Image: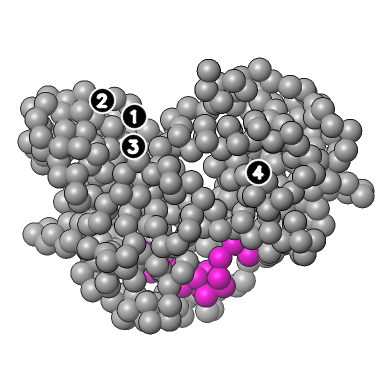
């Protein structure tokens, strides 16, 4: 029986009498933090609390490999070329150093859970819903549907919609990246597994940013996603119709079988999520703002953030109060403001980046390790008039309150 299923029986309270490190949420962020703490040599009791009972293949994670990365050896596919399509243009990027990699969520979950199962100081409480956290007193109290317990430190890893995240103030840019994807097996070889499609704008939508995203695993199998960025988006039925049209008309498949469907929404917001909620209450992952506002990517940023937390915790140093470098927060805010103000023509911004910026520089920028030269190339590729206008709007906007 897999580790993902072996934890299907819920516990009601931590077994240790010591004050544990409580990690609320055992998705990617929570599991990654627990593994990072073990990597750093933390022997204190660790309790993960999650409402799920099993860990399924519920999503796909992709990123650029720009350095050592937890779980990277589990990547099931990598690509050394990616394309951006718009009107009659087909721009292909070929990095020399940094491939684009794909990770299957179930494989990552099982590897993370297997590691935790071997650690005597770790417990995973399943079927357990978090109701709230009381940060007052010497130790915060975690209240769940089954029990209340004290913790030495609490980490909120329940995502951007965590019940512990404050309501966002007015005045922030609030866009959402919504997607619906099919992993399909088609009747004849139509995909080129050596190159993935990062953005294909030919299935455009007059209402905003709309593109197809294609990860080809073999000549006959691929993940094909319909993605939109905006305030709203088309209904699920319409997205499925678009996928059918793409497979039949664009890819010339005659028949196909849908192996699985995945869907989701990714917040793209200028809201500054708080990484600290009190002396002993913290946040990781999307609840801490680990989703890159300008792109929706989070995997690499999460791994680096939890590693920094674990190293600081093990050394007795103050925990980091930011997820990424401050300059990226400013650049992302300006880009997102520009994207929000000119949604009907924003495809040109993405195409200009693909056409002008070297592939490795783009990979480094997307994973927070870019140099000033890389960033200068990014900025020079964007329409100056619109970016200056967005920068002026950003500079004059009232700063949001943050517990950061």
Q: How packed is label 3: few (under 14 Cα within 10 Å), some, or many (20 or more)?
A: some
Magenta region, main secondary structure: helix
Residue for badge 1: 261
Residue range of the region highlighted in magenta in the rendering: 322-339
Give the tally of numbered discs. Answer: 4
Around disc 1, counting alpha carbons within 10 Å, would you say few (fewer than 14), some (14 to 19), or many (20 or more)? some
Q: Which residue is mark 4?
A: 34
Using the numbered discs, state the Cα–Cα distance from disc 4 to disc 1 in whole angstroms.
29 Å
- Which of pointers 2 and 3 indicates the residue nearer the eye? 2
Measured along the vertical axis of the image, is residue 363 above or below residue 380? above
Q: Earlier in the sequence, mark 2 or mark 3?
A: 3
Give how far apart the Cα atoms at labels 3 and 1 are: 7 Å
Distance from label 2 to label 4 (Cα)? 34 Å
The quarter of the picture where residue 58 lies is: top left
Q: Given the current orientation, which residue lies at the most extreme right position?
A: 138
The alpha-carbon separation of the residues under discs 4 and 3 comes to 30 Å
Say whether marks 2 and 4 touch (CB < 8 Å): no
As drawn, the label of residue 180 is: 3
Q: Is residue 274 visible?
A: no
- Residues marked 2 and 3 touching at CB (< 8 Å): no
Q: Would you say 140 lies left or right of 211 here?
A: right
Q: Is residue 154 visible?
A: yes
263 versus 327 height, above or below: above
Q: Are marks 3 and 1 in contact (CB under 8 Å)?
A: yes
Residue 338 is covered by the magenta coloring: yes
Closest to the camera, between mark 4 and mark 1, is 4
Which of the two discs, 3 and 1, labels the residue nearer the N terminus?
A: 3
Image vertical order of residue 199 relative to residue 48, above or below = below
């Amino acid at each position: 029986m897999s580790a993902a299923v072996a934890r299907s029986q819920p516990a009601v309270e931590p077994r240790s009498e010591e004050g544990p490190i409580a990690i609320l949420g055992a998705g990617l962020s929570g599991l990654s933090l627990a593994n990072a703490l073990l990597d750093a040599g933390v022997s204190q009791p660790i309790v993960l609390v999650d409402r799920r009972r099993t860990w399924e293949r519920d999503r796909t994670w992709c990123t650029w490999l720009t350095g050592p990365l937890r779980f990277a050896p589990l990547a099931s596919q990598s690509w050394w070329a990616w394309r951006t399509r718009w009107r009659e243009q087909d721009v292909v990027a070929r990095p020399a150093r940094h491939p684009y990699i794909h990770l299957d969520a179930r494989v990552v979950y099982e590897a993370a859970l297997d590691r935790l199962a071997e650690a005597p100081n770790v417990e995973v409480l399943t079927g357990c819903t978090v109701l709230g956290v009381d940060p007052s007193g010497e130790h915060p109290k975690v209240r769940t549907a089954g029990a209340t317990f004290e913790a030495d430190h609490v980490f909120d890893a329940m995502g951007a919609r965590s019940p512990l995240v404050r309501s966002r103030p007015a005045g922030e840019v609030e866009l959402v990246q919504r997607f619906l994807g099919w992993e399909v097996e088609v009747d004849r070889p139509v995909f080129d597994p050596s190159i993935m499609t990062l953005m294909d704008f030919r299935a455009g939508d007059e209402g905003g940013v709309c593109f197809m995203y294609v990860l080809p695993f073999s000549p006959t199998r691929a993940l094909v996603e319909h993605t939109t960025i905006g305030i709203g988006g088309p209904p699920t039925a319409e997205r499925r119709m678009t996928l059918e049209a793409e497979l039949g008309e664009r890819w010339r498949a005659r028949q196909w079988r849908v192996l699985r469907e995945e869907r989701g929404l990714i917040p793209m917001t200028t809201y500054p999520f708080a990484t600290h909620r009190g002396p002993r209450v913290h946040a990781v992952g999307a609840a801490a703002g680990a989703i890159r506002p300008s792109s929706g990517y989070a995997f690499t940023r999460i791994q680096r953030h939890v590693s920094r937390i674990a190293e600081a915790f093990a050394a007795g140093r103050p925990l980091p109060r930011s997820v990424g470098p401050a300059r990226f927060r400013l650049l992302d805010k300006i880009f997102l403001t520009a994207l929000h103000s000119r949604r009907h023509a924003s495809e040109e911004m993405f195409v200009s980046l693909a056409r002008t910026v070297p592939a490795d520089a783009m990979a480094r920028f997307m994973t927070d390790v870019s140099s000033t030269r890389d960033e200068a190339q990014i900025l020079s590729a964007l329409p100056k008039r619109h970016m200056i206008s967005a920068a002026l709007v950003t500079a004059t906007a009232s700063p949001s309150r943050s517990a950061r």
